Amino acid sequence: MKKVVLLVLILFMLIGGAVGAMVVFGIGPFKPADQVAKIPEPPKPVFVDMESISIPIFLTDKAPKQLYMTLRFEVDMDKRKILQEKMPRVRDLILRDLHAFMPDHMRNRKSADLVVVKQRMMAATEKVIGPGIARNILISEVFER
């Protein structure tokens, strides 16, 4: 019985090696690489830069702080012009929103929660240019003092 099990195991190993060799050398009923359906590449991201923004943060029981950020907006190539035309309004709404939001946000924190800040900036951007135009906001520089 031991010999039969050993022979079956060796047979499976030989079959596995043969199939592996066929795959490596391109022999057999496998689809060639050129016939495999190619996934189209997603469009390369286009970034629109915004001037750096500075948000003063005044708290009643703490020293005043200043938050500096440099932002880049990820958009599709064909929608880039829309964002560039409305960039002054986007910048103004982001600044107004963060001026009102940051003192409450920083009251019990040592530093800003950039995930929450990014979500608020994205919401403000979508109010001005509409949903789906800006795919993402990249906070490229942050300095808090």
Image: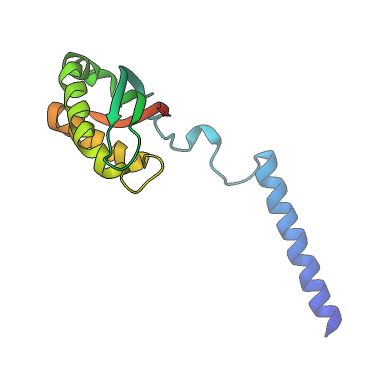
Residue 17 in view here: yes
Which residue lies at the image location 65% right of the left edge and 39% below the top edge? 26
Can you see residue 43? no
Q: Is residue 7 above or below residue 64?
A: below
Residue appearing at x 19%, y 23% in the figure: 90
Q: Which residue lies furthest to the front in this view?
A: 61
Which residue is at 25% across, 18% downward?
A: 80
Is residue 65 left or right of 37 when viewed as pictured? left
Way the structure is coloured: rainbow
Mark count: 0
Q: Is 12 drawn above or below residue 110 in the view shown?
A: below
- Which sits in the foreground, 6 or 76? 76
Looking at the picture, how far across and down is residue 100, in whole percent? 19, 36
Seen in the picture, residue 113 relative to 58 is either above or below; the reply is: below
In the rendering, at what x and y percent does residue 36 appear? 48, 38
Q: For the view shown, which residue lies furthest in the right direction?
A: 3
Quadrant assignment for the C terminus: top left
Question: In front here: 100 or 137?
Answer: 100
Closer to us: 16 or 83:
83
Image quarter where the N terminus lies is bottom right
Image position, residue 7 (x, y; %): 82, 72
6 relative to 45, above or below: below
Name which quarter of the figure residue 140 lies in.
top left
Relative to 59, is 127 on the left or the right?
left
